[in-house]
Image: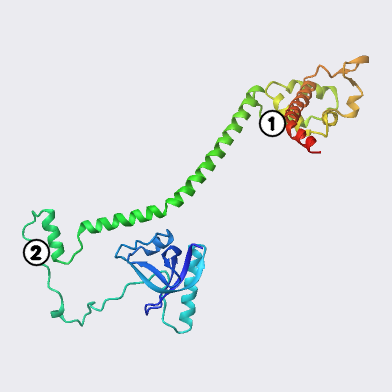
Amino acid sequence: MSFAVVTFLDGTNSVSEVPVCWLRGKTKCWWPKYKNISSLIGAQAKPDEANPNWTIYDVVINHYCATFEEAREKARHIDSTSSSEGETSAKPRKKNAKAHDDYITDYSDVEALSPMPTLIESRNLNLTELLALEEDAGIAPVTSNVQQIQENIFQCCSCHSSEDSVRSDKIDVMMDMLTSLKLQVDILLTRDSKTGGCKASFSEIEGIISLMPIKNTETLTTVENMLTPETCPAITRYFQNIGGRDAKEHIIRMLRQTYTNEFGIHCSFYGMRGNINISRLSLTNVMKDAVQEKFSIDDTQWIRQSKQRYIREMNK
């Protein structure tokens, strides 16, 4: 658990969520005197025990929580429960410093007010004289304030170091994914360049497919004229997507999509007995390319999986 909900036993019964690293045992808790306490709690800043701005208090631990939001919600719940039972109003998420009684009202005694500071006649003062005036007036030196700010920034940066490492891991994963995508795009571009690219419009490809299955010689002539170097790669992929359990079934399904039985009566593969010779058609070459590329893919996969099959054979 990273956070805890505690009740301060200093008379105020203040309730707050704190990082577990602020706890000392089960009865003590460190608390800083800063204005940006919520950011320190959320960042799980480690307490600076040597810093006088950090004070240790007696506390009672109410809950342990995994997240900052869960701890804050439980602190609010404890506060609302205490208020409904008529107890002293708790102050979740913030433990304020003791209030001062020397505030000014309209009825305060004017003579009790502190005197106005004396004006500095000469403005040509060096840094040493300014620091001396600040000490005489009870003002914290500027250098100490700057040093305190630097310490706070260093603490916040050290707390975010773990978050930066997690963010760096996520960036590495994203870079690996981008590299993988780039390789896939390069493979697709290489394959597209080998096939000459598909520069045909969708209407041309759709026009060829809409004419199939072919019913007569006129339709066959139209399809042959529409098969150009630009449209052939797209029609090849169309035939590849038809698929089948094996090469024979794949070829039969392509032929069913291409020719009707009525037109097939007047065709033969080599044009015997005066029938239409389909072996010389561009459409036949496209179907051959579809099956040939499928064979290359299956052959590559079979060779690549040889080691796995060999291991299974040896384990029998």
Mark sitting on residue 132: none
The quadrant in which residue 281 appears is top right
152 with respect to 267 (left or right): left
Q: Residue furthest bottom?
A: 86
120 with respect to 240 (left or right): left
The residue lying at 58 percent from left, 36 percent from top is 180
Mark sitting on residue 203: 1
The residue lying at 43 percent from left, 63 percent from top is 21
The quadrant in which residue 42 appears is bottom left
Percent across and percent down for residue 139 are 19, 64
Mark sitting on residue 119: 2
In primary-sequence order, the first of circles 1 and 2 is 2
219 with respect to 153 (left or right): right
242 with respect to 65 (left or right): right
User: Could you tell me if the residues under marks 1 and 2 are in contact, i.e. CB atoms within 8 Å?
Assistant: no
Q: Nearer the viewer, residue 205 or 191?
A: 191
Q: Nearer the viewer, residue 247 or 136?
A: 136
